[in-house]
Structures are given as C-alpha cells and as structure tokens.
C-alpha cells in the first residue's frame, strides 16, 4: 500500500514539473521594433523631375504622399521641417527611384505646409507605426576599418543637426543660421585608419578639403567640407558616391 502511495506521489510530482516547464515555454520574449527616423534633404516633386527621369514615378501636387526608399508602402510618417519645427503627417506611396542624396521626395502641398526653404530643405522623417525597422550600423574593429572603403551601396544621407536647441527656437520661422554642413565619412577607433581612407579620397577624387578631427581619445572623425551652399555639397557627395562609401552622413554646424 505504501508503494502505491509513493508511486502516486511521484507521478503527481513529475506531472507538476512538466506543467510548470510547459507554462514557462509559453512565455514569449517581447519583440522590440525600433521606429525609423532619418534627417536629411528632401526633394520636392515637379513634373520636370519626372520628364528628366530624375524621379521615375509621379506625385500629385495636392496629395499627402511621399516617396521613401527605406519604408514600405502605406507606412504613415511624420515629417518635420528642422528649421522651423513645423510638422505634417503623410503616407509612403509606391517605391520610386530618386537621387541617393535625398532622404525622400515630397509633394508641393507638403512643402508649402512645412514652409520649406527651397535652398535648405532639411527635414526629419519618422515612421509612426510598428511596421518599419531601422537597422543601426555595426561598429568596426581596426582590421575592419581597413576595408571601410570597400564597395557598398549608399542608401541615402543621414543629417544630424548639432546646433543648440535655443538657436533653433527663434521668434519667427525663417532660417536662423547660415547654410553650413560637413560630410562625415566615418568615425574611426584608430587615427591611422582615418589616414588610410583620407589618402584614398585625395588620390581617387578631386576633393582636397578632407579633415581628421579628434573627437575623443579613441574616436577620430573623417569628414570633408565645410560647405556653405547646397550645390557644392551635392557635387562632392556625388563624387564620393563613386567610391561606394556606406552611410555617408551630413552634419549641420
């Protein structure tokens, strides 16, 4: 009789353990989806851009649609004019081809609503749903830094505004600072790595204003510029694109 009680106890214990383990397996890890965000120069669509095949699809002037290469169709986005903080909600339309220098193509209506400066169309695009994922670039070791100039597609330009928030909040919505940007190539852990890439740029392009700035003990920023006009900035960016650098970044000074 005692053996039967012992057997029943053992069975209850085993079933209890299996049930607990089963319940633990049913607990799923939360999925973390990061919102897509990119600051850059936008392109205002015109029929002339389509005729010249600069943009391969059309946008209606009155629509709240945009072209954006990194977001899928029907993604809702918030667009902010970084020079006056005006915002608008729009929707990503079908995929379209347009110059890599721009982070998006917008309609004339959106440009007007944002009071966009045509000489400095600096906007922030943010997804406002959970269907888009932004992938951050991976850090490079010294050996990997040697290959930083290897061919890789340039998917757009990311622009970081490092001017103070106080300067951006003026009493009117007009441009408060002069056009002043640099093109950041990359940050390097070793200065020698930055020098290798600098030599390549100066050898294979006509760009001479290549700079190495020490950001911290183990961070050296390689950049070209500064630029005080959009035309000169775009010309050098296009020349850099021929070297297939990845993740070129613009910094507003």
Image (tube, helix red, strand yellow):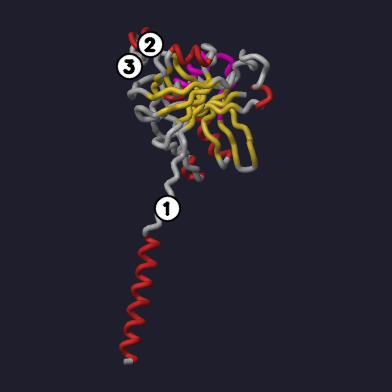
Res. 92 mark: none
Q: Position of residue 88 (x, y in %)?
A: 49, 21
- Helix or strand or loop: what does disc 3 sit on? loop
Res. 29 mark: 1
Q: Nearer the viewer, residue 168 or 184?
A: 168
Instruction: Choose the circle earlier in sequence order: 1 or 2.
Output: 1
The residue drawn where x is 38% and y is 66% is 21
Label 3 to label 1: alpha-carbon separation? 42 Å
Disc 2: which residue? 49
Label 2 to label 3: alpha-carbon separation? 8 Å
Q: Nearer the viewer, residue 167 or 51?
A: 167
Q: Is residue 11 above or below residue 84?
A: below
Indicate yes or no whether the magenta region holds residue 160. no
How many residues crowd around disc 2 within 10 Å: few (fewer than 14), some, or many (20 or more)? some
Looking at the rendered image, the quarter that the C terminus falls into is top right
Res. 56 mark: 3
The residue drawn where x is 42% and y is 37% is 130
Q: Position of residue 59 (x, y in %)?
A: 36, 14
How many residues crowd around disc 1 within 10 Å: few (fewer than 14), some, or many (20 or more)? few
Q: Is residue 199 above or below residue 239?
A: below
* Chain part drawn in magenta: 223-238
Q: Nearer the viewer, mark 3 or mark 1?
A: 1
Q: Position of residue 104 (x, y in %)?
A: 43, 22
């Amino acid at each position: 009789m005692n053996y039967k009680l012992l057997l029943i106890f053992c069975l209850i214990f085993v079933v209890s353990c299996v049930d607990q383990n089963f319940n633990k397996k049913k607990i799923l890890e939360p999925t973390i989806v990061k919102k897509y965000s990119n600051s850059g120069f936008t392109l205002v669509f015109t029929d002339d851009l389509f005729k010249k095949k600069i943009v391969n699809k059309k946008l209606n002037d009155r629509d709240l649609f945009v072209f954006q290469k990194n977001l899928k169709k029907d993604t809702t986005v918030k667009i902010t004019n970084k020079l006056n903080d005006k915002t608008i909600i729009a929707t990503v339309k079908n995929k379209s081809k347009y110059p890599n220098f721009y982070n998006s193509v917008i309609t004339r209506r959106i440009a007007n609503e944002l009071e966009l400066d045509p000489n400095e169309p600096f906007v922030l695009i943010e997804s406002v749903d959970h269907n888009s994922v932004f992938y951050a670039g991976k850090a490079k070791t010294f050996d990997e830094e040697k290959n930083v100039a290897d061919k890789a597609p340039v998917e757009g330009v990311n622009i970081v505004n490092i001017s103070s928030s106080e300067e951006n909040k003026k009493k009117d919505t007009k441009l408060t600072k002069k056009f002043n940007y640099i093109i950041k190539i990359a940050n390097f852990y070793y200065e020698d790595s930055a020098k290798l890439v600098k030599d390549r740029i100066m050898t294979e392009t006509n760009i001479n204003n290549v700079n190495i700035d020490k950001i911290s003990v183990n961070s050296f920023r390689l950049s070209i510029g500064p630029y005080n006009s959009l035309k000169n900035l775009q010309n050098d960016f296009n020349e850099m694109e021929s070297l297939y650098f990845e993740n070129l970044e613009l910094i507003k000074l």
